[in-house]
Image: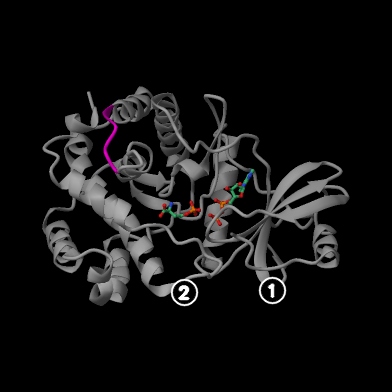
Amino acid sequence: MAVYTDVSESELGAFLESYAIGQLLSYKGIAEGTENSNFLLHTSSGAYILTLYERRVDKNDLPFFLGLMEHLAKKDISCPLPVRRNDGEVIGTLAGRSAAIITFLEGMWMRRPTAIHCREVGKALAGLHLAGADFQLSRANALDRAGWRKLWDGSRARADEVECGLLTEVDAEFADFERNWPKDLPAGIIHADLFPDNVFFLGEKLSGLIDFYFACNDFYAYDLATCLNAWCFEKDNSFNLTKGRALLAGYQQVRPLTDAERQALPMLARGSALRFMLTRLYDWLTIPDGALIQKRDPVEFIRRMRFHRQIGSASEYGLV
Ligand SMILES: Nc1ncnc2c1ncn2[C@@H]1O[C@H](COP(=O)(O)OP(=O)(O)O)[C@@H](O)[C@H]1O
Ligand SMILES: N[C@@H](CCOP(=O)(O)O)C(=O)O
């Protein structure tokens, strides 16, 4: 469920007077999503998404997120285009929240992605990396190792409630990352959350990328490692080599990996698995049952961390 803030018809009508998108015909809250309140709007000029930014989005980051979407859309990356208000701004205020309107993308996300979808995602991710290279703004990754540490400090004492031995295991991961986390890999704008629910398809054709609210500057290969975690594991947490091979081949078709990136991939995949495990663990332990926020299972990402730890080289992911 992701409508944390209600919007009345009169408030919305007044808000829309600042835009040239025609008359409001209908609007409804969108149940999917985690972080923000989203509404589907139909106006006399078409369909749009209205987003009210909630708890985890820092208002100061909005020019980066919305500017990035605008930059990528202009470079033919299929992503939402923020709609400018009559005063030229893209960010307004509605129901006490920062709010923006973006264009609606056709398509649906794949509940059961195949290797064909994985290849398309690999290509799109590499395209995004190339297209973002000349974006003028930058944003540090708030969920870098220092950010992971803060989440861990908030969950560590209760970690063994979720999985016996997790406290010792994750402490050891942090110590290893302290010594061995890669330096100086090719870096730039990354999506940082390109999970299946953020990629739309029309059949087997990728129709759009959404949800740029974790985007930041970091290693490109870290973004690819996140896609391996998000797209190439099955429900039973086993790695699907065919999907891994397809994702990596799709990526390299557009942006070949350097030797250093290839070598770093298992470590980056472990780090990425830890990052998603930690946000999930934190929410699991701190959000009361029955709250509006959807809690996701941290155990899936404990399994991925363990899988990556026993990987000897990136060829085991299907990298050629
Ligand atoms: N531009 C868009 N076009 C079509 N649907 C969208 C668009 N943006 C968001 N949505 C819908 O809203 C849902 C939540 O959006 P998302 O950005 O993932 O929210 P959150 O940041 O809260 O997780 C998506 O799953 C999708 O159904
Ligand atoms: N992809 C993350 C959660 C973020 O959710 P989203 O709805 O903003 O994509 C996870 O799986 O933990």
Residue 202 horizontal/vertical position (percent): 59, 28
The residue shown at (25%, 47%) is: 304
**Image mark for residue 234:** none
The residue indicated by pointer 2 is 288
10 relative to 280 in the view: left or right? right
Residue 278 horizontal/vertical position (percent): 32, 62
58 relative to 159 in the view: left or right? right
Q: Amino acid at mark 2?
A: Pro
Residue 68 visible from this viewpoint: yes
Local crowd size for mark 2, using a 10 Å CA cut-off: few (<14), some (14–19), many (≥20): few
Q: Is residue 229 above or below residue 66?
A: above
> The N terminus lies in which quarter of the figure?
bottom right
Residue 58 horizontal/vertical position (percent): 51, 67
168 inside magenta stretch: no
Magenta stretch?
Answer: 237-241
Q: Nearer the viewer, mark 1 or mark 2?
A: 2
User: How far is disc 1 from disc 2 in space, using C-alphas?
Assistant: 25 Å
Residue 12 occupies which quadrant of the picture? bottom right
